[in-house]
Image (cartoon, rainbow, N blue to C red):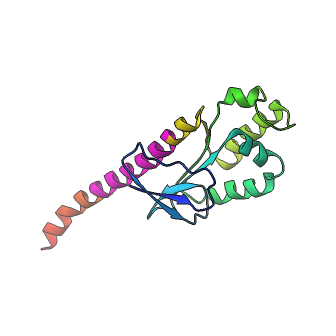
Amino acid sequence: MIIAIDNREQLAYSFKDYDCTVEAATLNVGDYSIIGFTDKIACERKSIDDLLGCLTSGRGRFEKELARARALDRFCVIVEASFEDLAKGMYRSQMRPHSACQSIIAWQVRYGTPFIFAGSRKAGEYYTHSFLSKYLYEIEQRHRMATKAQSPAKSAAA
């Protein structure tokens, strides 16, 4: 698997502990995708402070990204903190924790986007790799099944 990393991603995961390669790319949505499937799947990585920026001063821009992501087969936002960290206000922002939590829940409903609170940066990298890897596996399985289903038709036509 070749993971596409958006060239604007400031703290990119290395994926050095995983069986994959990485390639810089300009992604329309998200920070990570799969080469050849950038129009189908993406993951957006957020530290908790990045997330709070998206809830405050960057809210409009981020909501536009969530709206664009609806065109993808799969998209998720991976937060390198726990939901409890958000609920307890363990971030550098004046936003009330209740308001932050309610905004995230509203976005999940409005845009159909899961927000994965991975708990840490390392767990976020693990989840990102697994999410992309499982998507690619499912695509490969569907292709095999479609190819197998078409095999009898080819034999009958010959």
Q: Is 36 on the left-hand or right-hand side of 29?
A: left
The verdict on residue 127 being magenta is yes
Position of the N terminus by quadrant: bottom left
Question: 139 or 86, which is in the foreground?
Answer: 86
Q: Residue at x 81, y 30 (%)?
A: 98
Residue 109 lies, in percent from the top left, at 69, 42
Residue 28 lies, in percent from the top left, at 61, 64
Is residue 38 visible in the rendered image? The answer is no
User: Mainly helix, strand or loop, the magenta region?
Assistant: helix
Height in image: 15 above or below 158? above
Q: Residue at x 58, y 63 (%)?
A: 27
Position of the C terminus by quadrant: bottom left
Q: Is 154 on the left-hand or right-hand side of 79?
A: left
- Segment tinted magenta in the rendering: 126-145
Question: 123 or 11, which is in the foreground?
Answer: 11
Most extreme residue toward the right, as rendered? 94
Q: Is 129 on the left-hand or right-hand side of 44?
A: left
Residue 75 lies, in percent from the top left, at 57, 51
Is residue 20 visible in the rendered image? The answer is yes
Q: Residue at x 24, y 58 (%)?
A: 149
Q: Quadrant of residue 86?
A: top right
Residue 61 lies, in percent from the top left, at 76, 58
Q: Is 93 on the left-hand or right-hand side of 131?
A: right
Question: 75 or 3, which is in the foreground?
Answer: 3
